[in-house]
Image: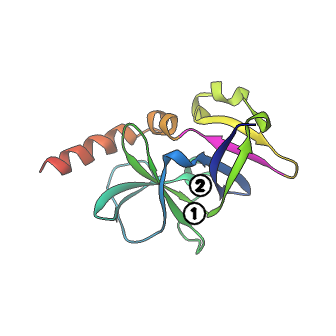
Amino acid sequence: MSSVKVVVFRCGNEDYAIPVEHVVSIEKLEQVNPIPHLPNYFLGLMKIRGELVPIVDFEQILYGRSASSDDQVRVIVLQTEEMFIGLLVLEAKEILDIANEDLKQIGLVNYSKTQYFSSVANLENRVITIIDPSILVRTVDGIKEIQTYLESVEVE
């Protein structure tokens, strides 16, 4: 029986997950340097192990409110083909193995604002929405600009 290993986190009152192969680390929210004129879900850049990582407030993207004031917040540092990105979430909860037969493809993948929802884990006592970080990076407005900015900063 095959399964997928995911890091489960909370935003709003819902559980979401990202496959562990994309997760570099889970960090506490430290000093974030804001960048003006970017969408409100970009908190700015945070230095993590010597690297500048853009921090995206996932609570803001999903629900229109910031998670940054909560004590439990964590930054899940993700690596995609395009870049490293930090996802600010309310709480990083656990690492879980989800059997492939418990994963259901969802019609919301076709909805332009949630293309990054790849599937839903329908478990006995809860539902967990699985996120594809590569699609998230490609579809959220402003990430391309952040990527260009980071490349220009690294060159200098």
Which amino acid does the dot numbered 1 rest on?
Answer: Ala
Q: Looking at this view, is 58 or 41 the one in front? A: 58
Residue that lies at the very extreme toward the left in this rendered image: 156
Instruction: Estimate the x, y position of residue 77 in percent, counting from the top left.
Output: 46, 55
Q: State the residue at coordinates (55%, 52%).
A: 58
Q: Which residue is mark 1?
A: 67
> Is the N terminus in the top left, top right, bottom left or bottom right quadrant?
top right
Q: Looking at this view, is 18 or 153 the one in front? A: 18
Q: Looking at this view, is 78 or 152 the one in front? A: 78
Q: State the residue at coordinates (73%, 45%).
A: 98
Q: Compare marks 2 and 1 and give the one earlier in the sequence.
A: 2
Q: Which mark is drawn over residue 83?
A: none
Q: Secondary structure at mark 2?
A: helix
Disc 2 to disc 1, how far (Cα)?
A: 6 Å
Q: Are marks 2 and 1 in contact (CB under 8 Å)?
A: yes
In the rendered view, tell whether residue 120 sits above or below residue 91: above
Q: Which residue is mark 2?
A: 59
Chain part drawn in magenta: 126-132
Q: Is residue 1 left or right of residue 39?
A: right
Q: State the residue at coordinates (57%, 67%).
A: 73
Instruction: Estimate the x, y position of residue 48 in percent, counting from the top left.
Output: 35, 64
Q: Is residue 9 left or right of residue 55?
A: right
Mark 2 Cα within 10 Å, few/some/many (few <14, many 20+)?
Answer: many
Our reading of the magenta stretch's main secondary structure is strand
Which amino acid does the dot numbered 2 rest on?
Answer: Glu
